[in-house]
Image (spheres, coloured by chain):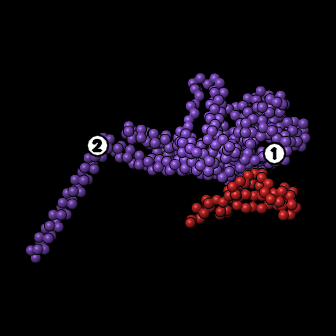
Chain colours: A red, B purple
Amino acid sequence: MSQSSQQQQKTIVTVLKCLKCSYTIERPFKEGDFIPKIDGTCPNDGSPLYIWAIYAKPLVEKK
Amino acid sequence: MINLLAYAQGANQINNSYYLLFLIFYMIITILFFMPGFQQKMYIYFIARDIENGLAKIENFSQNAKKKTIDLLKKSGAKNPDDLAEKFAEWFVIDPVNIEPTDIINRMKLLIRTSEDKIRQIIMLSLPNLDPVTRSKIEVSAEILNALNTIYKVVRHYLLLGKKLQSYYILLQLQSIVPMLIKMAESYEKAQDVFIKGIPVGDSLGPLVASRFLMNINEKWSPSREMIAGEMEFEGRKLIVVKAEGPMATVGRPGEAVENIINKLEGKVSRIITVDAASKLEGEQTGSIAEGVGVAMGDPGPEKIAIERIAAKYSIPIDAIIVKMSMEEAITEMPKEVYEASEKVVEMVKQIIRERTKPGDTVILVGVGNTCGVAQ
């Protein structure tokens, strides 16, 4: 696979965020995810983790 | 020796025959090229071949969209998915008469809304217990299928017409736009998968910005169909935030929503801020932000004019913030650059409120766009 086609390939990520301590975690997108759905709790303070963002990230980040 | 001489003579005769055939062929081609219309026929043949290749790609996109719509209908429990898909593919709306422009907006609004209602009615008749999110996915699939089918049929029409009339100029014009139509059709086909999965698209930028404010508001209401609004205090100002109701794939009726809110407040609004995704020009960066004046909205007319009219009635200034992206990025998965821009736009909105309004004022923030995958 050429480098340019690798750069065009994207993966969809869901970013979860704790609004209290700003703890952030990223995982692959699952059907049913939406912003700002509560999905789990923060491992630091037990506050709800919100789906903060869902976006397409290139598999090979541009330099 | 005699045999060898005979063989050499034979070979010479064959060479002469080939030479003669080549000469005749060359003469025929030369004569044909000087005959009136032959060159044009050759051009027509090659252009038509090129368009046919493009048309085959568009047909493939259209067929895939139909298959995905049928699968979605089957999965939702529809008994007649093929008939429904066929109905969506052939659906049409006749443009209002424009040689008499008086009241064209109201006529256009009526036609657009009647079409939306009718499509929804067709879906709900077949699937009465459908949830709003799945219904919105079917509605978007129907729109995409309809658009792809229309592109395919229009290109096919001009190709066949050009060939029938042997018109070089019809085919030449068609050939020049077919690559753009292929790109557009490809984007539509990709978009269908994204909407079916419920992933936010680039156009969800406006609703995402509005959602950042609305998620802190408990009491929300619906100012018009498929719209949501909430009121909060921001540094002494009353901020009313409006967006389409998510996470369904809908743009709602933002114009009507803003009009209703301002009428309810009897025009006591200091500023309207609109945020939307905008098409970038080639060479511009995805996610670049620009600020201006006016209603940032890619609407055919009725919703945008509703905000302009009510703002003009009460002399309310309108600000516009746009985030640039390509047409494909606007209807497929939100690029990372657009998400990053949304965070900056939230801060820009706060800055505009601080700088251009004073405590006690009322400000309306409208997040324009398709709210697929973005609730409130």
The x, y position of residue B127, in whole percent, is 64, 43
Q: Residues within 10 Å of mark 1 (few under 14, many from 20)?
A: many
- In the current view of this chain or complex, which residue is farthest to the left? B2
The x, y position of residue B128, in whole percent, is 66, 41
Q: Secondary structure at mark 2?
A: loop
The residue nearer to you, when weighing B305 against B66, is: B66
Q: Tell me if residue B130 comes above or below residue A30 in the rendering.
A: above
Q: Chain of mark 1?
A: B
Q: Secondary structure at mark 1?
A: helix
The residue nearer to you, when weighing B297 against B93, is: B93
Q: Tell me if residue B265 comes above or below residue B81 in the rendering.
A: above
- Residue in the picture at 68% in, 58% down: A12
Image quadrant of residue B131? top right
- Residue in the picture at 72% in, 31% down: B306
Q: Tell me if residue B99 comes above or below residue A63 in the rendering.
A: above
Q: Tell me if residue B226 comes above or below residue B105 in the rendering.
A: below
- Residue at numbered disc 2: B35
The x, y position of residue B272, in whole percent, is 79, 36
Any part of residue B148 in sight: no
The residue type indicated by label 1 comes to: Leu
Image quarter where the N terminus of chain B lies is: bottom left
Q: Which numbered marker is on residue B214?
A: 1
Q: Chain of mark 2?
A: B
The x, y position of residue B347, in whole percent, is 81, 48
- Residue in the picture at 80% in, 48% down: B212
